[in-house]
Image (cartoon, grey):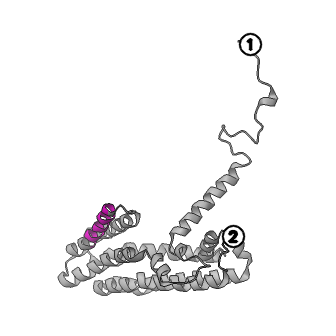
Amino acid sequence: MSGIEPSRADEPSGAERRDDGRPGEQQPEEERLSFSDALAAAARGSGLGKVAPGETPSATALLSAIGGVRGLVESILPGLGFLVVYTITGELLPSVLAPLAVALLFVVARLVGRTPVTTALAGVIGVGLSAGLALFTGRAEDNFVLGFVINVVWLVALLISLFARWPLIGVVAGLLTGEGSRWRSDRAKFRVATIATLLWVGLFALRLAVQVPLYFAGQVDWLAGTKLLMGVPLYAGVLWVTWLLMRAVYARPQQE
């Protein structure tokens, strides 16, 4: 062994060292890009992502935004099953098991058809948790508590974004168009993003204002019916208006 040590010139500089796990000069930028890409991917996967601000509205695009025909059926049928079974029988057990069976059938159908099952699995989890809570308490109206929690979470998140002057719809539109946060310096875009975010605040607030009193009154039939009416139809309508509002301040993306 010669014992000759490598020269200092051969050692990597501080900016080039990456193996020690300490953040280098380029790593934070890469992390930011990766996080931004992840957020953009999540935005594209959302309903608003199917109707990007610069596009021309169409019924086909709106149907795609709410999951297509299959997504529409998967969203409506479990709740409709609960309403029909409870109206006929007035019994808790068959009323909460019927939607769960329907949701499981959707998962099986997607597996057989070799299509993505993420949405259907999420539906099974939601229906299962709601059914479990209702069976645990013995109250049919508790089947809707999870829906209340989800609406409250969205309502709080939207309100926080407004108070922080980062309206959530503007954030999503910025991710979809690739302009980042530059929309905040455009008064028209900021104003429209604020209005659109307020529309979604109104959606979740209206659901809670109508359905929570029915819950405390024990009006299960009316609660199930209003949940259906204020579910996909109301969501689609607010999504459509949001799309039109954002389209007014975003030009169609130029194609090369």
Magenta stretch: residue 203 in it?
no
Vertical order, 189 against 179 (above or below): below
At 53% from the left edge and 81% from the top edge, which residue is drawn? 200
| Residue 216 in view in this figure | no
Left of 240 or right of it: where is 220? left
- The image quarter containing residue 185 is bottom right
x, y percent for residue 4:
76, 17
Left of 38 or right of it: where is 17? right
Pointer 1 local density, CA inside 10 Å: few below 14, some 14–19, many at least 20: few
Residue type at numbered disc 2: Ser
Of residue 157 and residue 4, the one placed in the foreground of this image is 4
Magenta stretch: residue 104 in it?
yes
x, y percent for residue 38:
57, 60
- The image quarter containing residue 81 is bottom left
Mark 2: secondary structure: loop
Q: Give, as a single range, the part of the protein colored magenta.
A: 99-112
Mark 1: secondary structure: loop
Image quarter where the N terminus lies is top right
Of residue 195 and residue 135, the one placed in the foreground of this image is 195
x, y percent for residue 201:
53, 81
Give yes or no for contact between labels 1 and 2 (Cβ–Cβ under 8 Å).
no
Residue named by callout 1: 2
Left of 248 or right of it: where is 137? left
At 27% from the left edge and 82% from the top edge, which residue is drawn? 83
| Residue 15 in view in this figure | yes
Majority secondary structure in the magenta region:
helix
Residue named by callout 2: 181
* Outermost residue toward the left in this view: 89
- How far, Cα to Cα, is label 1 from label 2? 58 Å
**Nearest to N terminus: mark 1 or mark 2:** 1
